[in-house]
Amino acid sequence: MQRTSPPRELRNQLAHEYIDAPSLKAAALARFIDGVEDMLAVWHHVSAYANREPGS
């Protein structure tokens, strides 16, 4: 069985409606906020790579 990636798991948790359990939604949002700096660092790295001059 293939596990989903952590970003996909977090996305799924954020997208899920926790009508009867707001603490679960709050926990998912807290995990997202904790990971924002890492996600931005990856984004900047990928963006710099994609925008580099050809041959460099």
Image: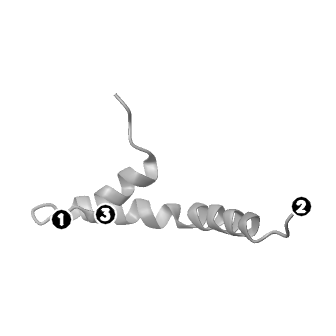
User: Residue at left 60%, top 61%?
Assistant: 38
Residue at the farthest top position: 1
Q: Give the CA separation, mark 1 to mark 2.
A: 47 Å
Question: Is label 2 in a helix, a strand or a loop?
Answer: loop
Question: Is label 1 in a helix, a strand or a loop?
Answer: loop
x and y percentages locating residue 29 in the rendered image: 36, 66
User: Residue at left 89%, top 61%?
Assistant: 55
Q: Quadrant of the N terminus?
A: top left
- Identify residue for label 3: 14
Q: What's the residue type where badge 1 is placed?
A: Glu
Q: Give the CA separation, mark 2 to mark 3.
A: 40 Å
Query: Do residues under tags 3 and 1 come within 8 Å of each other at their CB atoms?
Result: no
Q: What's the residue type where badge 3 is placed?
A: Leu
Question: Is label 3 in a helix, a strand or a loop?
Answer: helix
Earlier in the chain: of badge 2 and badge 3, it is 3
Badge 3: how crowded within 10 Å, few (<14), some, or many (20+)? some
x and y percentages locating residue 17 in the rendered image: 18, 65
Q: Give the CA separation, mark 3 to mark 1.
A: 8 Å
| 17 versus 3 height, above or below | below
For discs 2 and 3, the disc positioned in front in the rendered view: 2
Could you say which quadrant of the image residue 56 lies in? bottom right
For the residue pair 49 and 33, the one nearer the viewer reads as 49
From the viewer's perspective, tell me whether residue 32 is left or right of residue 49: left
- Identify residue for label 1: 17
x and y percentages locating residue 43 in the rendered image: 62, 66
- Identify residue for label 2: 55
Badge 1: how crowded within 10 Å, few (<14), some, or many (20+)? few
